Image (cartoon, rainbow, N blue to C red):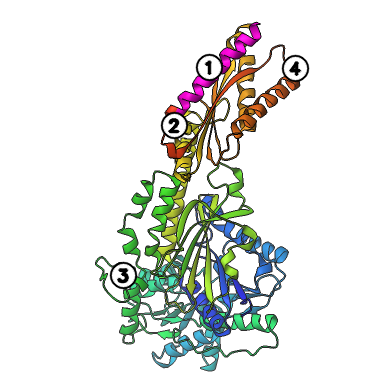
């Protein structure tokens, strides 16, 4: 099987109802063609008041490498309120993407657009108000004047009014912003008499309809007896409202599927185009605000999906396929994360709580290679090297699952290496940011079946928020621990840091390994301090620390054990000649430093070494004492040599 085609999707707030319908439509058609989908999503609403946090979210749009995608769909309406973000994404696409791009529901640059047929839906709503309820004095409340979606919805109303020979005058059309406040403002004008009372008001969004109906009710105007009110979008808010709002579910899924078809004509022009099946989740939904008998099945369905359950049937066959926000809230996840004592412990806790975001096929937590450091680079997107530190899947056999602080390193230009694996079926890969305020720590990837009923939503968003905060807390603990384990003057480990690192080295040691200890003690520090000043003494200490670093191997521990005493500690397959070679290198490097410095004094040091097999079960302190004794023997011998 060849590489699957990958359709990229860039959007905001995937848990919202419009975005969910878009994704379902895209996934439906991708499944038809065997295409994978890669969704790059900011999980929050654009124009979030917490600007720094939003910046961390929006860094996810810097991640896509369009060279590895075959086409891109932009549901531009999901970030249309944020001009800055709009321009940022448009610049990214224009400058970096050479693959086919299709916009959904709004013009985006010069790219082709596929529109949801809102016009027909509003003709259907208007026909219902005219034919079933016998109204003719019908107002229309839409979005901003000139806004494509607002004008298309208005046109559907006008089409049906014209078809029924009912004139539409300027004073029957009102512009708003699709939000509650627009409906409330119109209600106040009607109640005050500024606007003549109509028989019905058709609103271009549920939120405007809710605002209108609730405010009219406060003014003593009955709904639907005095004025009929309808909305649009089929939101949960319309059903949960005390006065349920008659609404219409737009055929967004069909438009999204058609966007995939449009891409297919550009990606594989010789391949057949599959017809888009009729979506059952569309059309008029009758509630109480128009006066017709309520669609109780629809209302119960929406209410059930919106409920916060408190008692779960853990034994139910479909329990693991259900996503429940209260199950997440009642698991004290954050408290568990906050108790993590180390980076590994934190990743362990994250690994063991991925069951809360089921169902999924695979989960990957990918962090920047410098995520533990305090760096301005974290505010500039993702590092060239990323590392997968948590991997889990939904199978019973988790032998290949892992959590590891070291991580499995890959280049961020590949986004996720597993994206290019051969698979028996196509999947969706959700890429979502992991960040603390504006600092980008990495990103999470959730791999799911394209046919999965539940898409990512508020449970996943809030779980990732907790994960991000947990990583920041352990990052802060790690930095504090480093400060407490590092000698400020030299940057070497102090004794506390030595014991911490030694524990790690010993845990990884093989039975055949040896423990190597060098003890280095500076000669004549008091003479330098007394004769040339303490600044020169400090210079000597730092010079000796640097020599210690140069002589040590990458996996060995360099320690400033006291004022002028240093250790080199290693665990490995050392030979008997290794300590001799290392000692020669130490004194050679020391000689080179003295020549280059040309100080009026000579930096001098004495060295002692001990190297013993771990299997001999000799304690670290015993070996350290042996090395220290040999250092003093060396110091005494060197002192005698200088005096003769």
Question: What's the residue at 57%, 52% (across, down)?
Answer: 368
Question: What residue would you read off at disc 2?
Answer: 620
Q: Which image quadrant is residue 243 in?
A: bottom left
Compared with 71, 595 (above or below) is: above
Q: Is residue 608 visible?
A: yes
Q: Which mark is residue 307?
A: 3
Instruction: Write down the region rendered in magenta.
Output: 623-644
Q: Nearer the viewer, mark 1 or mark 3?
A: 1
Where disc 4 sits, the SS reads loop
Question: Mark 4 and mark 1: span between their CA atoms?
Answer: 27 Å
Residue 385 lies left or right of residue 396; in this view the side is: right
Question: Mark 4 and mark 3: span between their CA atoms?
Answer: 78 Å
> Marks 1 and 2: in contact by CB < 8 Å?
no
Compared with 394, 250 (above or below) is: below
Residue 69 drawn at (x, y percent):
65, 71
Question: What's the residue at 30%, 83% (across, down)?
Answer: 296
Q: Quadrant of the N terminus?
A: bottom right
Question: What's the residue at 54%, 76% (across, down)?
Answer: 423
Label 4 crowd (10 A; few <14 / some 14-19 / many >=20): few
Where disc 2 sits, the SS reads helix
């Amino acid at each position: 099987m060849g590489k699957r085609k990958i359709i990229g999707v860039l959007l905001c707030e995937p848990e919202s109802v419009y975005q969910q319908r878009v994704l379902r439509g895209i996934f439906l058609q991708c499944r038809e063609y065997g295409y994978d989908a890669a969704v790059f999503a900011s999980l929050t609403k654009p124009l979030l008041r917490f600007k720094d946090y939003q910046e961390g979210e929006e860094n996810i749009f810097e991640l896509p490498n369009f060279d590895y995608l075959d086409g891109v769909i932009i549901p531009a309406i999901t970030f249309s309120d944020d001009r800055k973000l709009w321009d940022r994404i448009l610049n990214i696409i224009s400058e970096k993407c050479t693959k086919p791009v299709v916009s959904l529901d709004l013009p985006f640059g010069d790219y082709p657009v596929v529109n949801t047929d809102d016009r027909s839906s509003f003709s259907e709503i208007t026909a219902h108000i005219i034919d079933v309820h016998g109204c003719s004095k019908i107002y229309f409340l839409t979005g901003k004047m000139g806004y494509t979606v607002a004008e298309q919805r208005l046109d559907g109303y006008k089409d049906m009014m014209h078809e029924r020979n009912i004139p539409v005058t300027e004073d029957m059309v009102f512009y708003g912003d699709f939000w509650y406040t627009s409906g409330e403002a119109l209600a106040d004008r009607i109640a005050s008499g500024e606007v003549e009372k109509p028989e019905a008001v058709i609103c271009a969004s549920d939120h405007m309809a809710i605002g209108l109906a609730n405010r009219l009710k406060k003014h003593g105007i009955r709904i639907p007896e005095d004025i009929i009110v309808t909305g649009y979008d089929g939101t949960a808010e319309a059903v949960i409202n005390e006065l349920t709002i008659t609404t219409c579910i737009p055929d967004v899924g069909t438009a999204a599927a058609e966007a995939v078809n449009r891409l297919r004509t550009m990606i594989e022009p010789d391949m057949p185009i599959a017809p888009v099946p009729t979506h059952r989740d569309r059309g008029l939904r009758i509630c109480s605000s128009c006066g017709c008998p309520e669609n109780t099945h629809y209302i119960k369905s929406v209410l059930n999906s919106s409920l916060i359950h408190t008692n779960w049937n853990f034994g139910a066959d479909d329990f693991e396929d259900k996503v429940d926000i209260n199950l997440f809230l009642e698991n004290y996840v954050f408290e568990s994360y906050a108790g993590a004592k180390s980076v590994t412990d934190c990743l362990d806790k994250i690994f063991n709580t991925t069951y809360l975001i089921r169902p999924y096929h695979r989960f990957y937590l990918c962090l920047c290679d410098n995520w533990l450091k305090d760096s301005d680079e974290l505010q500039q997107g993702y590092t060239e090297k990323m590392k997968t530190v948590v991997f889990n899947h939904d199978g019973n056999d988790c032998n290949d699952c892992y959590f590891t602080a070291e991580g499995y390193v890959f280049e961020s230009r590949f986004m996720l290496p597993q994206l290019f694996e051969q698979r028996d079926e196509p999947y969706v890969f959700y890429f979502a940011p992991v960040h603390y305020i504006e600092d980008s720590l990495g990103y999470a990837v959730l791999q799911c079946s394209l046919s999965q009923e539940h898409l990512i939503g508020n449970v996943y968003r809030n779980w990732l928020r907790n994960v991000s905060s947990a990583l920041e807390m352990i990052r802060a603990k790690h930095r504090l621990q480093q400060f407490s384990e590092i000698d400020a003057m030299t940057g070497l480990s102090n004794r506390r840091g030595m014991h911490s690192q030694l524990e790690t080295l010993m845990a990884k040691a093989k039975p055949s390994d040896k423990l190597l200890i060098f003890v280095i003690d500076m000669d004549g520090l008091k003479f330098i301090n007394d004769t040339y000043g303490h600044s020169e003494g400090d210079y000597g200490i730092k010079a000796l620390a640097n020599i210690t670093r140069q002589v040590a191997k990458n996996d060995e521990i360099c320690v400033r054990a006291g004022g002028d005493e240093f250790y080199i500690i290693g665990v490995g397959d050392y030979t008997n000649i290794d300590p001799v070679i290392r000692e020669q290198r130490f004194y050679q490097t020391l000689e080179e430093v003295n020549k280059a410095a040309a100080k009026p004094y000579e930096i001098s040091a004495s060295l002692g070494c001990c190297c013993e097999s771990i299997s001999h079960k000799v304690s670290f302190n015993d070996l350290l004492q042996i090395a220290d004794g040999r250092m003093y023997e060396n110091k005494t011998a060197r002192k005698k040599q200088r005096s003769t």
